[in-house]
Image (cartoon, rainbow, N blue to C red):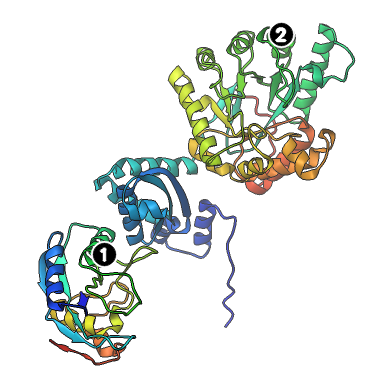
Amino acid sequence: MGSNLGAREDRLKQASEEMSLFLTETKYSSVYHTEPMGISEQPWFLNQVCVGKTDLYPLELLLRMKEIEKKLGRVPGPRFGPRPIDLDLIFYDHWALFSEMITIPHPRYKERSFVLRPLIEIAPEWRDPLTGVSPAGYWEKGKHGFTGCRLY
Amino acid sequence: MNFGVRLLSGITPAELVEEFKRIRVSPEGIQIMKNKGELILLRIDHISAQAASILKQEMLAKGGEVALGRDLAYLREGNGEAVLMGTKAQYLRLLSILPSQPFGLGELATEIKRVIDLSAQTPPALTVKGRKFQWGKRTYIMGIINITPDSFSGDGLLNRRQLTDFLLRQAERFMREGADLLDLGAESTRPGAEKVSAEEERNRLLQVLEVLVKESPLPISIDTYKSAVAEVALASGADIINDIWGLQYDADMAKVVAKFDAPVIVMHNKASSGYQDLLTEVAEFLNKSINLAEQAGLAKEKVIIDPGIGFGKTVEQNLTVINRLGELKALGCPILLGTSRKSVVGEILNLPVSERVEGTAATVTAGIMRGADLIRVHDVKEMSRVARMTDAILRHGPVRDVLDIRA
């Protein structure tokens, strides 16, 4: 979950409220402050990761998340541009799906410190189904590059 | 290091198992892997968006894939089509979890299993007039005998005796040249030929039928779509009905063939050549014909299907049907292909009727390689040789027995 526009903390809260309709046994990581990628001259992001259980299939889950993004005001714009709320599905249990409509685990999660750090916090035992590597393992590999990500 | 990499092609599942044995794969390994070497592309004509979504994700999770139209996938409602892709092993794993899913996926699993099983099987053997047709063993030849005016070159009407003698000699010649059965037609189905009344057709047929039935050991099929003609012909000793309207023109036809327990050839036909989806519509038409036969009380083993080359199809459509003939195997019936001297050959080669032997031969070979079990031809000598040679390539080993007399 990420937000860099407007009342960022509120948006994260709203998003988690919306998602509680289909996510149970949820665990939320601490909120992190992240330097924006790509286009500069933007406010810093607030990022958070949530782990939970759901009855929905991955595609339905993703579509519901996109609906919440729209509801909370995300408009299509430049990639890496400012956004009120951004919700990404990182993993779905041990499933590995690669298709035009959905790719999980998220293809770029292992290069993002703002995903890895919170994951290490709340889901350290999860393993990437394609490689067997844990979030901590990927953190160590260091591909995530920039260090501009710290506790908020 | 030279790895010696090579593609395997034209290989059946049974041959793949042989290949495994040749490289000394363990028996357990063969069991697990034989299904991983068989790719299945399967088409679903009607599926709801909810079912399609679950199907796609479950198949993806097993390493396969399901292609869906964008509307079906993203709008999440309505109905549409899907194409499933995967190895047989992935399909079997999919089939084991689908029954526990909602949205009719349990029924879908049953249908998928049925289609996959049918495509791998050969239809049960059929015995007609003491001759056993063991589908899959070799290609069977049906010789065309025409008793229409346009099959005689303007010599005036032959009298009954001359006509009968002429046709009897033709039947004997066909048998010598390799025919397994004869197809008798009294109304020309060529485009533009004049229609005849049931009465006229019946008279022409009866003149010769009695003699042919007695004198020729080959099973006799009657090319008619009129139940009245069929009834009289079967009562006079004919063995099979060849209906160019697949039991769907004359509502009494199914009853008649069932009454005589006679095998029936059902052909796809259409007044125009406009199709939404060619193969789907041909398959659906033939499926309906099969159902009509079964509902009337005729066993499915006695139904032979014919995709109707040259009937309600453009040149390109005819070529497509021949090329994709294998898709009709899922209907579970032996397939008859009739392309002899037809305009699809004439158009492609730009040749008149008298010059279409080689073109016909090409369609015969292509059809057999794609799954035809029976071919209907004018040039029995030539096409019998073509079929035997094709069988030797396709079914491994020269076929020595031309006549199977005992059931």
Q: Residues within 10 Å of mark 1 (few under 14, many from 20)?
A: some
Rendered location of residue A123, percent (x, y): 16, 76
Residue at the (52%, 57%) spot, across then down? B16
Residue B191 visible to the viewer: yes
Q: In the image, residue B269 lies at what x, y percent?
A: 60, 29
Residue B79's place in the image compared with B195, above or below, is below
The amino acid type of the residue labelled 2 equals Glu
> Subunit of mark 2?
B
Q: Are marks 1 and 2 in contact (CB under 8 Å)?
A: no
Q: Which residue is mark 1?
A: A66
Indicate the position of residue B165 as horizontal and vertical percent values: 82, 13
Separation of marks 1 and 2 at Cα, in angstroms: 72 Å
A34 shown above or below B358: below
Kind of residue at disc 1: Lys
User: Which residue is pictured at 25% across the width and 76% down the height?
Assistant: A83
Q: Which residue is mark 2?
A: B200
Q: Say which of A109 and A43 sits in front.
A: A43
**Residue B360 visible:** no
